[in-house]
Each structure stands twice: as C-alpha cells, then as structure tokens.
Image (cartoon, rainbow, N blue to C red):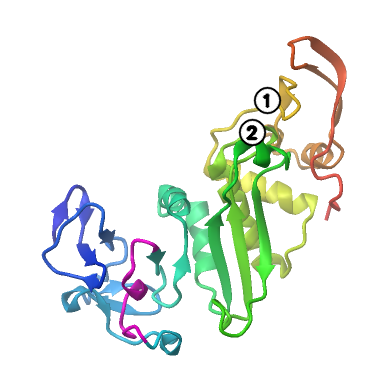
Amino acid sequence: MMIKNGIQNSIAFTDKGPRKGWRTPLNIINDSEQRDEETGYGYFGARYMDHELLSSFISVDRYADKYPFISPYAYCIWNPIRLTDPSGDTVIFKTAAAKEIHNKYYNKNEKYTSTYNELNKQKNIAFVIEKRESNQKAAASYRIEGGIVEQLFPEEGEPYYEYEEVYRVEWGLPGPELGGDESHVYLEEIYHAYQILEYGSNEGTIEREIQAKEFAFSVNSAIQVTCTDSYGRQDVPTQLGVISKKDFNESCRFLKYGRKGVTIRDSWGNVMHNAVIPGAYSGFPIR
C-alpha cells in the first residue's frame, strides 16, 4: 500500500489508461474505501478490480457491446478524471462541482450516504447528475432554488437508451429565499431523485418539498433564517429557516400560502409592518 499526500492506493492515469509508477496529484483515484480485505481486490459492487493488472476489472462490463472500441475490462472508459464508476456497472457522468459536494458528504454523513447508495444501486434507472450553468440573477428569478429533476426519453443510439427510466438531476445556484447555498440545492435535488423511488413518480407536492428541504438541512445545517429577498426586502424569513423548526403545518402554510403580517424592511431600510410574503409553491398540492 502506498500512502502519499494522505491518499492510499493511488493509481496514475494517462490519456490511454492507467500506468504504474506515475504519480501526479491531478491524475489519481482513491479506492481505499472499497478495498476488499480478503481478496485484496477493489470492490465496486458489481465487479472487482485487480490493481496489479493495471487497474482493470477482472470481469467484463455487461454493457460492453455499447463500447466496442474500449476494453470490456476498462475502468471509466480510461477516463477517470471526467467520469466515475462507483458500482463497477454503470458510468455516471458528473461535473467536477457535483463530485466535490458529493465527496464532502459521502461516507461522512449517514443520511446522505444511504440516500446516494440507494440511487446508485438501481440497475434499470439512471440518474444523471449535472450542474446548471446559470448566474445568480437568473437563479434568483426562480425564487425557490436553481434545481430540477426531470425525466429524459433517449432514443435508440443515444446515451442511457438501455435504461428503462432516465432522470436528469440538475442543480445550480439558489435564490436568496431558500436560505442556503448551492450544496443545499444539490442535496434537495438528490432527495427529490430518491423520492421517485419511494413514491414511484416525480410529482411535485408541498409534502415532498418539505421532506427534501428537511433532508438538505439535516445534512448541512449551516443556513440563514432571514435574507434580503429578490425584491430587495430585508429580514425576510427563508424557506430553510422555517423548515428547520420541524413544524410540518407551519412549513406547509409558509411554502404554499406564504405569510401575512410580517415586519420586514424595504430596499431602503424602512420598516414595513403587515407585509405579505407570497408562497413559493402556491401551485403545488399539499400531498
């Protein structure tokens, strides 16, 4: 076992695949969490990897016919910098930003880890996680958060066609009314993806929004309880701030109907009594 810069069992990759002896901080993978102590192989859930065989799997990819130009024993189509293969079965395309947030919580937060593992073990459903490219002003126009889970319908010959269902989990910058940062948006959308498995549909309801926000808060409790909203009003209650109180009825009323009689400040700092905060999810059913 090699330990260098805090990384165990590092494997170096070139543009043509892994190469023994190369050590570069930009081209390494860490399999220390997946090492099978009995066999010495790296365990990825669906397949085992023998690192002595230049970091190749010891059995073929069941989707090998999709990639006739790549060895069926290859890891991540020899491109571990852009791709990940956490199960040894399906390549999941992620942006670097998504991987950064994932690595922050995976195997460190029990709720996040169990939820992500549930998504990752699905064989007939693909969840494609990617970051929405938008600016803060565009994200704020949503007045909720810059994220969405939507079903894709790839045609024959397109990526993910072999799956029975495909969902894009897209996330980005939040609007100020959320009361969190982009990691909260990522966590919400991950949980919305999990809800598809739990409920069997991708329907939007107030109850599911509350559950997703409670999940985001339980994983990352660093939130703002008030904000300057997208209209410039100050001291406005945030969604995560209300959700954090764990009062389902209050959370329902706030998300669907908003709040009346609130004392806040306008964009010039003047006190506003009996102000109205509209419900961000007024068009959603409760359940």
Locate residue 50: give its quadrant: bottom left
- From the image, tell me which residue sits under label 1: 226
Query: In the rendered view, does 50 fall on the left or right side of 193?
Result: left
In the image, residue 63 lies at what x, y percent?
A: 45, 85
Query: In the rendered view, does 147 fall on the left or right side of 31?
Result: right
In the image, residue 138 lies at what x, y percent?
A: 67, 41
Label 2, secondary structure: give it. Answer: loop
Q: Residue at x 87, y 38 (%)?
A: 257
> Does 178 lie within the magenta span?
no
Residue 17 to residue 9: above or below: below
Q: Quadrant of the C terminus?
A: bottom right
Dots 1 and 2: beta carbons under 8 Å?
yes
In the image, residue 204 lies at what x, y percent?
A: 77, 57
Q: Residue at x 34, y 85 (%)?
A: 72
* Residue 197 visible in the current orientation: yes
Label 1, secondary structure: give it. Answer: strand
Q: Given the image, on which type of amino acid does mark 1 rest?
A: Thr
Q: Quadrant of the N terminus?
A: bottom left
Locate residue 150: give its quadrant: bottom right
Number of residues whose C-alpha sits closer than 10 Å to that of mark 2, classed few (under 14), some (14–19) or many (20 or more):
many
- From the image, tell me which residue sits under label 2: 179
> Does 75 lie within the magenta span?
yes
Residue 251 to residue 204: above or below: above
**Which residues fall within the magenta stretch?**
69-82
Q: Residue at x 35, y 80 (%)?
A: 47
